[in-house]
Image (tube, grey):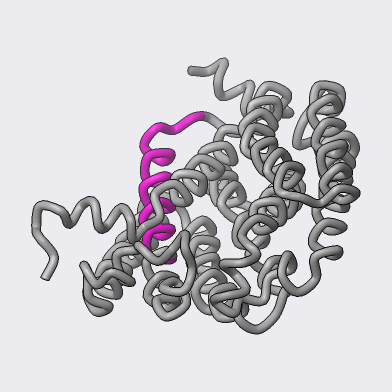
Amino acid sequence: RAELSKLPHYYMALSKMRLTGLVVTTTLAGYAIAPGVFDPGVLALTMLGTGLTSCAANALNQFLEVPYDSQMNRTKNRVLVRGVLSPLHAVAFAAASGTLGLSLLAFGVNPATAWLGAANLGLYVGCYTPLKRCSIVNTWLGSLVGAIPPMMGWAAATGSLNHPVWVLGALLYSWQFPHFNALSWNLRPDYSRAGYRMMSVTHPELCRAVALRHSMALLLLCSVAAPLADLTTWTFAVDTLPLNAYLLFRAWRFYREPDSATSRTLFRLSLVYLPLLMLLMFLSKRRRKTEGAKQTEV
């Protein structure tokens, strides 16, 4: 039976707070980049609803993966593996978090954002999690899950999913590959032991090639697609060129000389790359006439 005083700590572990923090941050970035007048109330509800929905997804993921987490060094101390929370307790927490989170998005923000949140919860728990033991397709599906939060932020700000937001989603989708493929390279023994079908384990050359391809894709998305879609001005293409060139160089090194050093360097770069990209995108965002007019009225 869990100690009451430690429940907040256990719930944070069950929610994978670092991952949830990343999800909320990219949602915030999507809201900030979107056209429209800043509404602190809507933004707060968006972040809270998204965070709670992410907590639910991560709790259900851990509930489903207890037998496999117990075989991996980096997950064998999770709360459900150690038995400090019961499976029923974890599912109840997930149900409460998911219901509250999606309700906040649906009734406090707008239906489009809530539908995206519900779809992401379903994709992560119902598709990505079981596919990890069946097919390397799980990586592409997991990248789709990572691409949706900034689209939720955009939908919260605008109430729609017009064409610029798809470029924003594509940027986050492509970023997942150099980020996760580099991370998974040094976790191959763990993944293999638990029976996970990860590219780094079953198709190591493809793992490196896909990371390189999507690093190239990021360069094209930033240099061409984002300005053409009116997501950003053309200064964004110029400002992000050194950042993308360095990411591409590190992905190339990982592809040509795959080892723990090159993979770790690429992974660490991906952690710096994303916030820098979001900042540059915000500074170069395309300001619509309606946005400017409303700000003038205020």
| In the foreground, 288 or 141 | 141
Lateral position of residue 74 relative to residue 133, left or right: left
Looking at the picture, does residue 194 appear above or below residue 169? below
Residue 253 spot, x, y in % from top left: 86, 42
Residue 237 spot, x, y in % from top left: 85, 28
| In the foreground, 85 or 28 | 85
Lateral position of residue 35 relative to residue 113, left or right: right
Residue in the picture at 62% in, 52% down: 160
Can residue 107 be seen here? Answer: no
Residue 81 spot, x, y in % from top left: 33, 71
Lateral position of residue 10 relative to residue 286, left or right: left
Can residue 152 be seen here? Answer: yes
Residue in the picture at 54% in, 76% down: 194
Looking at the picture, does residue 57 appear above or below residue 113? below
Looking at the picture, does residue 28 appear above or below residue 143? above
Name the magenta segment's main secondary structure.
helix
| In the foreground, 114 or 277 | 277
Residue in the picture at 40% in, 32% down: 40
Res 87 → quadrant: bottom left
Res 220 → quadrant: top right
| In the foreground, 56 or 285 | 56
- 210 falls in the magenta region: no
Query: Image quadrant for the N terminus?
Result: bottom left
- For the record, the magenta segment spans 38-57
- 41 falls in the magenta region: yes
Res 279 → quadrant: top right
Lateral position of residue 186 relative to residue 20, left or right: right
